[in-house]
Amino acid sequence: MFYRLLAKLLEYPTADLTGALPQLHATLRHGFEAAEWLVLERFMRHLADEDLTELQAAYVRTFDLTPEHALHLTHHLFGDDKNRGPALIDLAEYYRQYGLEITASDSGARELPDYLPLVLEFAAQLEADEARLFLSQWRKVLEQLATNLERAASPYAPLLRLLEKRAQLVPVTA
């Protein structure tokens, strides 16, 4: 549930998301460490308290208009270098080995396989240790992304720190 919830919270905010906040909030105390649910609860309160249009504008400014905050993980490794393409192909092939095909969204757009919410949706399908191992390959990127978001005082930064902590190979205890 952790990775699926983070995937939803890191997506572009919609009326569906803000409408589902009470239901999402109800899941927080089950399967989450206390420190995690406090961060998640604070973030969900932020989503509930803000106007949807402002949330959407802030999301676009944060993730779409600021390359240092991009949610496409290979962007942080390769930028627009030609080596990014093969990395994306390898990741899509890895997903296919687990039966995950990347399909177009409701808007008709097809997301790249390194888009963090998609990466988290994939991790949610894995066993806990396997998900941690899979995400550990992205730990340095997650750390840098969290640092960049902290510098911008983004409310998304604590979510990335939670994910970074979960991506450590050594299990974290409360």
Image (tube, rainbow, N blue to C red):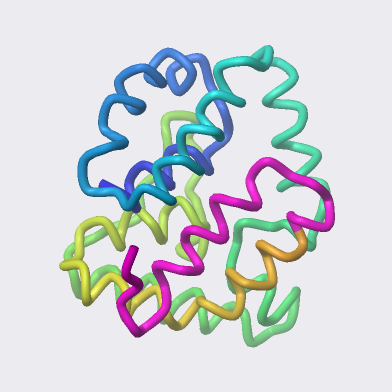
Q: Reply above or below: 167 against 51.
A: below
- In the image, is residue 151 part of the stretch drawn in magenta? yes
| Left or right, 5 with reference to 78 | left
| Left or right, 160 with reference to 130 | right
The image shows residue 108 at horizontal and vertical percentages of 48, 35
The image shows residue 12 at horizontal and vertical percentages of 58, 34
Residue 172 or 13: which is nearer the viewer? Answer: 172
Residue 12 or 36: which is nearer the viewer? Answer: 36
Residue 43 image-quadrant placement: top right
Residue at screen point 42% across, 30% down: 106
Q: How many marks?
A: 0
| Left or right, 60 with reference to 133 | right
Q: Reply above or below: 102 against 44.
A: below
The image shows residue 35 at horizontal and vertical percentages of 43, 51
Q: What range is drawn magenta here?
A: 149-174
Residue at screen point 42% across, 73% down: 167
Q: Reply above or below: 19 against 10.
A: above
The image shows residue 64 at horizontal and vertical percentages of 74, 46
Residue 8 image-quadrant placement: top left
Residue 102 or 159: which is nearer the viewer? Answer: 159
- In the image, is residue 148 part of the stretch drawn in magenta? no
The quadrant the C terminus occupies is bottom left
Residue at screen point 24% across, 60% down: 100
